[in-house]
Image (cartoon, rainbow, N blue to C red):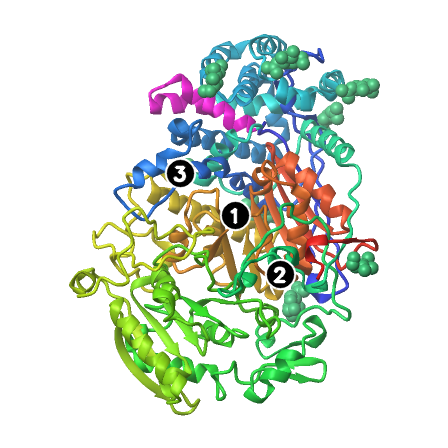
Amino acid sequence: MALGKYTRVENRRSSSSYCSTVTIVVFVALCLVGVWMMTSSSVVPVQNVDVPQENKSEVKGQEKVSEVKEQASETSESKTRQFEDNPGDLPEDATKGDSKVTSNQGEEKQEEQKPEEKTEEKIEEKVEEQQQQEEKIEEKVEEKPEDGSKPETEDGGNKSEDGDSNTQNGDSNSEAGDNGEKKSGANEDENKTNSDENENKSEDEEKKLDNPDETKDGDKVNGQIEEKVEQNDKESGGSSGEKKEDSQAISQSSTEVFPSGAQSELLNETTTQNSSWSTQAVESKNEKETQRSSKQQTVYSWKLCNSTAGPDFIPCLDNIQAIKSLHSTKHYEHRERHCPEEAPTCLVPLPEGYRRPIEWPKSREKIWYYNVPHTKLAEIKGHQNWVKVTGEYLTFPGGGTQFKHGALHYIDFIQESVPDIAWGKRTRVILDVGCGVASFGGFLFDRDVLTMSFAPKDEHEAQVQFALERGIPSISAVMGTKRLPFPGRVFDVVHCARCRVPWHIEGGKLLLELNRVLRPGGFFVWSATPVYQKKAEDVEIWNAMKKLTKAICWELVTISKDTLNGVGAAIYRKPTSNECYEKRSEKEPPICPESDAPDAAWNVPLQACLHKVPTDPIHRGSQWPDQWPARLDKPPYWLLTSQTGVYGKAAPEDFNADYQHWKRVVSKSYLNGMGINWSSVRSVMDMRSVYGGFAAALKDLNVWVMNVVSVDAPDTLPIIYERGLFGIYHDWCESFSTYPRSYDLVHADHLFSKIKKRCNLVAVVAEVDRILRPEGKLIVRDNVETINELENMVRSMQWEVRMTYSKDKEGLLCVQKSIWRPSESETVKFAIA
Ligand SMILES: *[C@@H]1O[C@H](CO)[C@@H](O)[C@H](O)[C@H]1NC(C)=O
Ligand SMILES: *[C@@H]1O[C@H](CO)[C@@H](O)[C@H](O)[C@H]1NC(C)=O
Ligand SMILES: *[C@@H]1O[C@H](CO)[C@@H](O)[C@H](O)[C@H]1NC(C)=O
Ligand SMILES: *[C@@H]1O[C@H](CO)[C@@H](O)[C@H](O)[C@H]1NC(C)=O
Ligand SMILES: *[C@@H]1O[C@H](CO)[C@@H](O)[C@H](O)[C@H]1NC(C)=O
Ligand SMILES: *[C@@H]1O[C@H](CO)[C@@H](O)[C@H](O)[C@H]1NC(C)=O
Ligand SMILES: *[C@@H]1O[C@H](CO)[C@@H](O)[C@H](O)[C@H]1NC(C)=O
Ligand SMILES: *[C@@H]1O[C@H](CO)[C@@H](O)[C@H](O)[C@H]1NC(C)=O
């Protein structure tokens, strides 16, 4: 339970400047008391077991400690609720998923939070005044019974158990020993939890006996917790369920409980204290768990992936077996995702001569040739001033194809053509189709615009890989037969320069996909040769586009010419009402049926239909978001208080709590406490975003964050876009559509404990290894068990563990990937040509 804290910090300076930051490790030995109320018998589970008893405490980054509390959040709950665009539906949707937790979640969370806070406070107090604490501890000892109740709740997972817990609370006065007995009798469910802890309870007990102090500490905490619980009851009306919830929060062992605990932290944290101490109990418990997990996993035998793609292997895009069996490639099916049934568990080799990537912003102009040793693009595009081989560098003079005289000139030209575009104010998040090496997106950073660039993995070889190596956001994707993995109506502008997408064919299916993702009132900037050249082919395409754009009610705002760059752009605007649609003489393309959800985008086939524009002022898309950066902080207008958020509060409140939480975590821990040199971090992946709070908290850094919303999580991605950030839907049981070594930092908040229930954790870790650059960092927040498992795993890959910290079954892990690669290799059958 919440009592002990255990921190290990390992700081090493890596030879490279990359890792140069060193965290100062302070070890303070302190005595904390774990509460022990366990019954000794191995068969009967002991509730108190959860609270480890160890005296030692190591104090390390205080900030970290405080953060850890915050971390645990929402996980399980998130799944339950869904945000949808349709306001009317929202409340209902929100409630949908959670059979178990939902109803009580809000209450639970609040209650839980308080207890944790108190714990922290006490801990601080302890640090300052140990003696006083001891005295207190004794007093508290009596209160222990709650602890027992907590485990029960966790194990059972049922609210009915709450009743039991309450009873126990009543018993709270009884001594620890008594509690243990009662609990054991009362809770059969506890076996699960206990089993883990059961290893040698007798030993634990002995320890307790040996260390009276430990017990005291635990008691204190418990006592405090109880107090809070009582308060909660008063506030909420004292339902029995609430008490249990509190206990759950404390114990947190079960996943279900997890979220609630996290929430509590979110909502209200106590201030950060300087020192955190781990109790002997916690340490010994953690040690046991570590040993146990190491026993379980024993040895990981990593192998190199032997595939035709070699060091550029993307499992879902290089599934040669699947591609060969396609019936047609007419719609670029061979560039779409074809994931293998089983995600590979091998590690992708490094290219020969790989070096630490050049840092942003220099990387925008040049990258190491040997990191992306593809000359074909340079050969093809060299004369276009696109990319050149210059010594050991690849250089990107001036920008991409369109921008012989500078991307910035072109960017400003667009705004001069249509001042309403207002880069960095009205326009914040855009989509760049067929991005080439993404120079456009790279230079739009200078205008405070975030660009999601994509291009197919095509014969030009690794355009997207160049972009990523340059530190510019991009993914491999294609306009083929399926929707793009983004929600509807989220991009302020869609841009396409010389993209050879056949917009006009097949009923305008592809342009209608852009229409889906474009915000009502948003602009489509099309600067392809049909706009400004008069060749027969161009004229034909232009005429077809003219007809199609009229049919879908896009207003041609202007056609202008960038004389310096020698290109022209046609700029269209998507309507903000349905008036034009209704007035069309020919209803072609048709309006999509009401049942067609514009946000549904995961493996959904393209349809040649138009989604109506939302007009109800409470619906997303009916109004333009606030100007950047104001839109970052405020809950979107279409988040209603009647909706329940992912953490169980009213949605806007939930949004704010999440933001505050991440601001705290980032400022107090990530920026300073973990030995990360943020000036060498550019590309960040948040593997499990909720509201984008983590990304928002990094706003002032020179980074971009890819926010991933799992396909089985509540759909909060529209919220992320609304606040001027971007992201993508994804299922982490499959590989991500990016090249190897494209991210500097990967962040996973309560992802792994969930994902490992659905798929092979080793494969997910291999995927993290794939997308992370050598010397890149991985930050994981999760339950202790998962943290330990991960730590063993990454250690076996010779990653450097920078910090592990755990408290109350919640853990934080920060590791740095190494350059190590296994010597053995494994042939990936599906990826051999
Ligand atoms: C952090 O990285 C930057 C850029 O690589 C470097 O200039 C700076 O010295 C580093 N700071 C530390 C403390 O290592
Ligand atoms: C726990 O919940 C499950 C599902 O709701 C139910 O079948 C079971 O009876 C419950 N157990 C208790 C002890 O309430
Ligand atoms: C507890 O463990 C005992 C022994 O393994 C088992 O018989 C019993 O069913 C378990 N109870 C629960 C709830 O798991
Ligand atoms: C408990 O300790 C004894 C002696 O060390 C050992 O033989 C036994 O396997 C342990 N039991 C568990 C569950 O770890
Ligand atoms: C626990 O720590 C306290 C304070 O350091 C110490 O007096 C006590 O002996 C320790 N107990 C054990 C078992 O280490
Ligand atoms: C957090 O705690 C502080 C101080 O106890 C209190 O003023 C504040 O209202 C709390 N915030 C929340 C969201 O509970
Ligand atoms: C932490 O300790 C340092 C040094 O004692 C002190 O300056 C700082 O104010 C403390 N911070 C907190 C939050 O206690
Ligand atoms: C990789 O796989 C190919 C095809 O199976 C095989 O010929 C080659 O020897 C393998 N290479 C290694 C290093 O195993």
Q: Residue at x 64, y 84 (%)?
A: 379
Tell me if residue 88 can be seen: yes
Going from N to C along the chain, the mark reached first, 2 or 1, is: 1
Q: Amino acid at mark 1?
A: Arg
Would you say the magenta stretch is mainly helix, strand or loop?
A: helix
Q: Amino acid at mark 3?
A: Arg
Looking at the rendering, the stretch of residues picked out in magenta corresponds to 227-252
From the viewer's side, name the closer residue of 325 and 639.
325
Q: Secondary structure at mark 2?
A: strand
> In this rendering, is residue 120 above or below 210?
below
Residue 517 in picture, x, y percent from top left: 37, 60
Indicate yes or no whether the magenta region holds residue 237: yes
Residue 775 in picture, x, y percent from top left: 70, 60
Residue 113 in picture, x, y percent from top left: 46, 33
Other residues around mark 3 within 10 Å, as few (<14) / some (14–19) / many (≥20): many
Q: Which residue is mark 3?
A: 81
Disc assigned to residue 744: 2
Q: Is residue 612 left or right of residue 97?
A: left
User: Looking at the rendering, in which quadrant would you find the C terminus?
Assistant: bottom right
Disc assigned to residue 688: 1
User: Looking at the rendering, in which quadrant would you find the N terminus?
Assistant: top right
Dividing the image into four equal quarters, which quarter contains ligand 1? bottom right
Q: Quadrant of residue 535?
A: bottom left
Residue 660 in picture, x, y percent from top left: 43, 48
Other residues around mark 1 within 10 Å, as few (<14) / some (14–19) / many (≥20): many
Q: Secondary structure at mark 3?
A: loop
Estimate the spatial distance between the alpha carbons at disc 2 and disc 1, rounded to whole Å.
16 Å
